[in-house]
Amino acid sequence: MLKRYLMYWICSLLFLTPTVMAQAWKSSTPGAGGWYEAVGVGSDGVLLIGSDLSGAYISKNNGQTWDIIGATKGVKATHISAVGFHNTDANILLLGSDSGIFRSTNKGVSFSHVLPAASYITTIQSAPSSSAILYAAGHSTYNKADAYIYMSTNSGATWIKQASGLSKIRIQKLVVHPTKANELYAVSAPDRFVPKSAVNQKIYKSVNSGKTWQEFAPALKKTVFDFGLVKANPNEMYLSTDVGVLYSANAGVSWSNTGLPPEYDYYGKNVGYSLWLPTTANGQVKVISNALTVWGTKNGVWLANKSGAKFTWKSTTPVTNSIGAKSTWETPDYWHYAERGVADLLTGFYHNGESLRTMATDPRNANRIVMVNDQWALQSNDNGKSFNNLFTKPVGTAWASRGLENVNVYTVAASRWTANNILFAGYADIGCWRSLNSGTSWESCQAPEKGWDGDYGGNTSTISIDPSRQGVVWAAMGKSVEGAMSLMRSNQSGKFDSWSTSMNGIPNADATLMFGLSVDRNSPVNQRTLFVTANGNVYRSQDDGKNWKKVLDCRSRTQQQNGVQAYCTSTAVDYFNRNLVYAAGSAGVFTSQDGGNTWNLTNSARMTTAVSLAALFNPHGAGRYFVSNIVADPLTPNQVYIAVFDQKNATNLGGIWMGTKGSNWSRLYKNPYLRHIVASPYKKGELLALSSHAYTDGGYSSQSAGVLQFNPVSKTWDVLNQGLAFNNLSAVAYTANVGRIVIGTMGQGLMKNW
């Protein structure tokens, strides 16, 4: 009797317990991939990097590993555009964002929002002669040249606006005089958001703590790229200009040319140099080309032998080889090289003033420089003779992140074959990746012709795995999601050189913006039926993806009905009845009961604001309404779920909905920003749903709910956000191991719960 009760208790416990336990999410990516806005090195060697999508990153071991700084640490901004340090207290760190300044007094453990202004901060600088005074420069929005100047007199705890609305000034760098805390210089230059035509590319000087400004050295009439002074002797000043590097020994009264000629990039544009000045009286003057690339023939880093006002320049960069690339200049120690065997990386500075924020010297080591750009983080410890990465490390023949991410995931997938199961992730900018060892390391699965041609890394927007045939995978890839895309098929588990194009019948006009791949698991094993959305319409293949036919013109149907074109972006097939097929998106929900031959609109809620498909998923627009995805229940016939994103206050339909055969909808959870839902293949009625205000361009909202789990027994939703810096999630999949889940994020890449 006791044994019977014990077995009953165990079975009851298993039935009541969800398969997904509340374990912390852990990063599982190849590392890096996104745009980095700023970098800095503190007096004690702490590294800070600001990203445009996922907050900031901190390293306390010279870049060997990184920790993310986000909303859970008090930084409720995904776009970090500046980093700063206190000049005497290494515990005080500062982050500039598109919503003001955040400050930490415990070396990054937590932050407070000390300047909650609607100001895009581009630089933060301590006054060397005062432990209390700091300055910051900002602008009214991310894309305006109308500089604001802020000052703090209490080590960054509070800030006062000193000046505002400085016309056509976009400040990328502040230089504070080493002995006069009220004297500072500002470098105005364009960046990725503000073009050169909108900016006065000049140096400005203030002698009253930033309240008023005058152009510095106007008689030179030069375009200026950078300015600096030698801290040990501030009368010595340097200007990087369109005629080369200039030198002054008398605080700018007169200038002479150092003999280093103007610098031009690959396209013939005059881009100048960034200054790498010494901190000691006898230190060596160095400059870095703003055309610094491994693939270009330009020299990278120059050292000056200085005698009085006479300079002799020598390049530290290795000579170029026969194909024009720098030999031994960039250590091939990261996945771009290994996956493609190429050496034409765009690992350089931006060809504009943003390089002043993306390069940092080490105050402890005159030979060290750290630099970031639109995809990578690199460092040199030998005056620029060679560079190595700070974001990934090899694991066998694959790669594992050091914790520095900043990349968006469009889709995730996990095989549930009988053996040798694989994880897949489809990314923006770095394309398709797969893991053969449960997420320990990753290798690229992007088809060579669909990315990594020396510019970015391609995009993979949807992946579907054959439920029973080992190794068979389909994916949509392209150099850009909004450009030409291709459906691809692999028989070798997505090995990067195993893909073949599989999209006959999809015209060029619709071969773009592909989403929502689904496989009919009950179709003939070697002649699978698949569905996909392409440019907002639904296509079907009945021969394993070789040939496709448009079966639902969502765009025309909605245009005819309401006069406003809407789109389908997701498909699903019932697990038990292969004739029951769904398509959904901003067009609402369509249901077919004859395998996709004919369709009926079974949920008429739809978006009525005219917007392009490319802009649909972006939350920063009025009237957004769409079904983010639709999924059939793998354990219950006829049952279907949709995740709804709804910013139309009048309708307020955002959340998770359940229906039967595409009709009789009831809401299970209410939230305006639902992005994805999946039903458990292991426990009947268990659901996982993801919420995200942000899409591919970042953003923070307290209404982003993150990861939600529905327990069908208790009828409750649990929030599973431990380990997430921001609650911006995009995709989720159950793996072959019960309880193991992978999620895709907007900013942190792929994450797993084991």
Image (spheres, grey):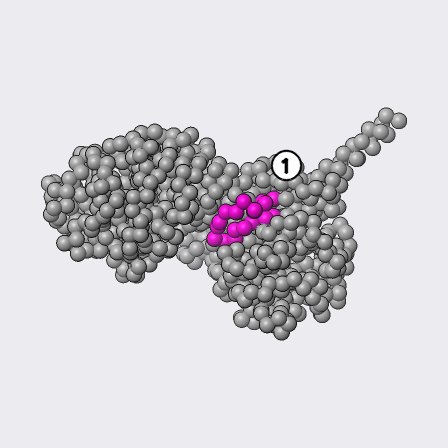
Residue positioned most to the top: 2
Q: Name the residue under label 1.
A: 22
Residue type (three-letter) at the residue carrying disc 1: Ala
Q: Which residue lies furthest to the bottom in this view?
A: 560
| x and y percentages locating residue 590 in the rendered image | 68, 64
Which residue corresponds to the image point at 84% horizontal and 29% vertical from the top-left? 5
Per the image, is 325 magenta?
A: no
Residue at image position (29%, 47%) is: 163
Seen at 69% across and 44% down, the residue is 710
Q: How many marks?
A: 1
Q: Give the quarter of the figure containing the N terminus.
A: top right
First to last magenta residue range: 690-707
Neighbours of disc 1 within 10 Å: few (<14), some (14-19), many (20+): some
Comparing 631 with 31, the one in front is 631
Q: Position of residue 13 (x, y in %)?
A: 76, 34
**Quarter of image, res 596:** bottom right
Residue depicted at 22% across the width and 55% down the height? 223
Residue 705 seen anywhere in this rendered image of the structure: yes
685 above or below 265? Answer: above
Identify which residue, 632 or 435, lies in the foreground.
632
Report the magenta stretch's main SS: loop
**Residue positioned most to the right:** 1
For the question of whether residue 415 can be seen, the reply is no
Residue 249 image point, x, y percent: 12, 42
Front in this rendered view, residue 171 or 684: 171
Whole-percent x, y for residue 366 in the image: 27, 36
* Left or right of 563 on screen, residue 248: left
